[in-house]
Image: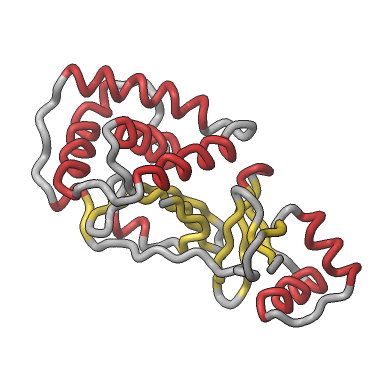
Amino acid sequence: MMGWQLGPGVGFCQVAGDPVFLDLARDKYFALRGQDRAAFERLRRGEPNDSDAMTRLVATGLIARCDSATSLEPSQAAVPLGDLASHEDSRFGWPMALRAALALRWARRAMQPSEIAATVGKLAQAKRRLGVAGDEGAVVDIARRYAACRWLVPVRTRCLVDALALDHLLLKRRLATTLVFGVRLDPFAAHCWLQTPDTVLTGTSAEARNYTPILVVR
């Protein structure tokens, strides 16, 4: 059975009843309006669409053919209440400072608009290969040590660069976590963070909970 799925690097969520999309390849957040929104909702419900409507939807890059039944569900991630503030601070260490500097240098390149879609795709593949979430204690320990030396690295703190850098560090140790992109409207703002089931690892839980997950990489 041939169906439809979201295109590579595309996620969506419902914010106040409106479908909002993130397209990493185009480095763009946007909402579908009018006939395109109606066509997308019909496709989600399994209702017929005319050829012109489908042509427009495919042209957006939001959807792609797949070998299974149509699945066009909004992104979901339960944001934990805990964050690193609920754990004891870790001691500064030069070895982690060096690893953090290298990871941040990698992340600055990896987050560029021309690279971010491929970066997230590779992170997703690495997590799927591992197959299981990383041990909570081991993950939090590395995140605490990263945070303890972050001030030393002369890279401006930004949610995306730090989430990518820490994700990169953890995957090198075969520890998988969840990378979440979130959005809010009125006024528009976007955020990105790394989390386990119990702990927000970059930024704070309070901040993350102000956003609706739009793309979840686990």
Check the image and tell me how it is coloured: secondary structure
Image location (x, y in percent) of residue 166: 33, 36
Judging depth in this view, the residue of 199 and 58 nearest the camera is 58
Does residue 7 lie above or below 209 as drawn? above
Does residue 102 lie above or below 177 as drawn? above
Residue at the extreme right of the image, as rendered? 52
Does residue 102 lie above or below 156 as drawn? above
Judging depth in this view, the residue of 67 and 29 nearest the camera is 67
Image location (x, y in percent) of residue 198: 22, 58
- Is 143 situated left or right of 35 in this image? left
Q: Quadrant of residue 22?
A: bottom right
- Is 141 situated left or right of 206 in this image? left
Give the residue displayed 46% in from the left and 61% down from the top: 213
Viewport quadrant of the N terminus: bottom right
Q: Quadrant of residue 127?
A: top left
Give the residue displayed 19% in from the left and 50% down from the top: 136
Image location (x, y in percent) of residue 192: 44, 48
- Is 54 situated left or right of 116 in this image? right
Q: In which quarter of the image is residue 35?
A: bottom right
